[in-house]
Amino acid sequence: MGIKISRRKFLQTASLAAAALPLSRLARAAEPGLVKKPVAAPGSFTGTETRYGGMCEMCFWRCQLTGKVRDGRLVKLEGNPKSLENGSSICARGNAGIQLLYDPDRLKYPLKNVGERGAPKWKRISWAEALDEAAERLKVIQKKHGPHSVALFPHGASAFYPLQYFEFTGTPNISEASFYQCRGVRDMAYMSTFGFAPNEDVDMANAKVIFLVGTHLGENVHVSHLKQYLKGLENGAKLVVLDPRFSAAASKADIWVPIKPGTDTAFLQAVMKRLLDTGKYDQEFVAKSCTGFDQFKEAMAHATPEWAAKTCDVPKAQLLQVADLLGANLPNVAVHPGRHTTWYGNDFQRSRAQACLTALLGAYAVPGGLIRPKGVKLGAASWGHGVFAQDCDLSKFWPFHPPGTPTDAIRETTLTAKPYPIKAWIAWGQNPIQTIPDQARTIAALKKVDFVMVTDIMPMDITMYADILLPEKTYLERYDYVKTGMQWDPAAKPQQFVAARMPLVEPLFEGRDSVWIVNELAKRLGHGDKIPVASIEEHVDKRLAPAGLSIAKLKALEGIFTQDGVSPYAPAGKREFEFDTESGKVELFSEQIDSNDFAGSPAYVPTAEVPAGYARLVYGRSPVHSFSRTQNNIWLHHEMPENPLWINDRVAAKAGLKDGDRITMVNQDGVKSRNSTVLKVTPGIRPDTVYLAHGYGSMNPELTVGKDQGIDDQSLITLFGIDRETGATGMRTSFVKVVKDGRTLEMMV
Amino acid sequence: MKQYGMIIDLEKCIGCHACAVACKAEWEVPADQGRNWVQRLGPETTADGLASTYYPGLCNHCDQPACVPVCPADPVKMEFKDPKSGAVKVMEVAATWKDPFDGTVQIDKNRCLGCGACAEACPYGARYVNPNLGEEGKADKCSFCVERTALGLAPACVQTCLAGARIFGDLNDPDSEVARYVKRGAIRLESDAVKIGPNVRYYGKKRDLALLVASCAPKSMPQASLRRIWLARMFKPVVKGVKKETLFDLFG
């Protein structure tokens, strides 16, 4: 045999002797019978079987997938080429789904906490033991304090069935992060204006102007949505972005308005007043399809460009430029309704303003406007409606609240037992530690209740507080969601699709699906005779039945059924529409809102000013993460291991801070960030604002990749707003100072 | 002769990192490495205003690849065949070479020593040593997914890109989309000190390209490469002309 020499030594030794190494290797390679590690990856197309019917849940857009499987192992996820939405594209998170499936830190078995909440010691138990104990403890609580003493925090497709079940048992105390800390404000505002929730169904692909109010597309990634956005830009749409930060979207914008945080409604009012003053609004649409015009006009009268320019800290000329651009291109203007819209606690009015602006521009059911995609009618299979005890509804103070109960009302009721005790918290796919502001109060509530049950896939910060912790199957191992919709480009040939989530691989460990778990609980809680479906497969089949489909039929169709659809555009020239509002028209002024003692036309409600020496903490999305859910994904972690704090270059210079500095933060209440992060010094953010991507800095030590990586923005949000109309949580309302080397630094504007 | 190349259209790229992650899955790249990568640049002030863009990087399959001549593996005669014309060309190559028919730079992982000289030589940092391959690791990098394109599939990064921001094709074909991008001004990421003919080009707004070049164009050829080149030169004449059998006899 030749000379054995290590690679390192070879690299270190630049000599002829070392050069002899390759020859020895060559000789050894030729030796027969030697078992060797593979020298090259074969590629996902070699020796794999393609499985169809996958549906992503790395976020909640639910792109359709195929999986490449080799020897039972999923090696790659790809977009299903049959998909009318994402096609063969998926995002970074979608591609990284396999690292969730095979994450060694996954929850594998039912666990019982034999330590303390927050400092758990886990004991592996059987499903029967876990369900018996959970049912027993829930039964005692429900019997003693009533069914409404159980609160549920659901998130994701699998949480839908448990949500229906607990509502059926008689608790209204269900709070979805996707409503109360995200979309609920927007949906209720558009419901009150147009009579329907807008989703993000705005036709950017065929717009002449795209108007983003804080929406940071590119950092917020949903595949088909971004395809629409990019097609619009490619077709020459002008892009206007309101954002205190030079966001991913701002970097592509024709007009970037670095607006003062919290003042968007003032800007929108002034834009609408300008349109009214110049007559550049869709007069025919307003006359035929809207109501409350006179009161609306009066409510906008105060919003002069001078006032708004001062209020929003933007140049008056820029404001007028935006208004005139919108007016000149009506009705083909995409006024994006936003997605995460719970910002300041004045958000219902801002979302109302976006809806009214859409109406004023006549941007409805036209290319570029707000549209209502038509999918295929699906069936339902659910628990019956719940009967709530009298006076147990905590949401009554917020007449325009989205379904469920405002999160803060549940937490405060839990802590005060007023007007009644809440004694059990159940989290199902939601991580309330990192979704709700003021973590200390959330933790206090979790420690106060008699029982905490959590169902999840990964150890999260919330799972540390569980008494009983149940593992769910991942989206790659289970059936559940049924999706319908249309082709991604509204102007293309109208098509519709139905897809159902189907497993791509055999389940690992002891994870179960939510229908099985809930049914087993229900049997133990005396609801065995009311179970609507025996299995998740039956649930899916019942959803599919009205479309003439079944799991078996969809499988034969490579996971997706398609048929001819309907154009989302009204016939050209049609300006009269009926809407599902009280008046049957778009409500520029709403009697219903007005009669509840709120402003009937969009009103600007100022948010608290930034105290001297502080900066406002604003947060947003990272394109490679879905909040805290994906922090432990080793591929995604590699792409963005922490969340840099954006700070204005002039403010940084005054504080003696440099790009790349390692920093921590302290907020207005003296709460310090648990972790540090890196500073990003840039002219691309307002001096009064600092910015972090949300979801980082998880604290669960069982997250061997994600723990303590970056700063948890939610840990610093102790001052928060509650939206008066909806009860949703405004979270851009806390203020921070940067701390470096133990010194707290003044943020001097 | 073809010269495969890739255009990154920064007007479309939204910085989602799907390309980097899809490649990881496709080629089983270790979690802490990448055959390709995305860096966010800016916001920074440029002569044309505030700019923020991305650096989606990968192997440039250069006209004069710095990685090829440094490979110390003993050269062998290798036959290349143009799949289209059937033309055949025989070259003497080490464990990495530039393909005479499609212009891609490839690695023979069977003969790669895993020494990492090529990784050190690349001014773009496009190569790394994958420790999971072979006994002591193998050099790895973007192959332009020629293994996929041979089967009619798009490169993994191109297939997953929702933006259509990665365009793959033959730069020598004037009718190709990539060639049209070159005509429209797609630039090479190079500097006065580093001009080795990268065949990945970037297209975008002037201010974004200015930021990209200022932040990411390599400023010098890696120092280490000189040592590798010397080593390779010392080594090659010894091997040349010596038959394989003799080598086995020597060391076997």
Image (tube, coloured by chain):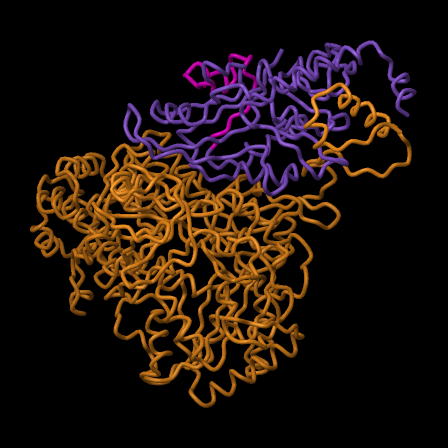
| In this rendering, position of residue A613 left or right of residue A672 | left
Q: Is residue A143 above or below residue A287?
A: below
| In this rendering, position of residue A259 left or right of residue A148 | left
Is any part of residue A17 visible from this angle?
yes
Residue A465 location in percent, x, y? 50, 71
Q: Is residue B94 above or below residue A377?
A: above
**What tint does the image give chain B?**
purple
- Which residue is at a point 78% across and 21% down the rendered structure image? A17
Residue B4 location in percent, x, y? 58, 19
- Which residue is at a point 53% across and 63% down the rendered structure image? A158
| In this rendering, position of residue B243 left or right of residue A540 | right
Q: Is residue A720 above or below residue B27?
A: below
Instruction: Pick the residue in front: B189 or A201.
Output: B189
Question: Residue B245: which quarter of the image?
Answer: top right
* Residue range corresponding to the magenta coloring: B164-190
Please check the rendered image and state whether residue A126 is part of the magenta-colored stretch, yes or no.
Answer: no
Q: Is residue B207 above or below residue B81?
A: below
The C terminus of chain A - image quarter: top left
Residue B204 location in percent, x, y? 39, 25
Instruction: Pick the residue in front: A83 or B77.
Output: B77
| Chain coloured orange in this rendering | A
Question: Residue A596: which quarter of the image?
Answer: bottom left
Residue B48 location in percent, x, y? 28, 24
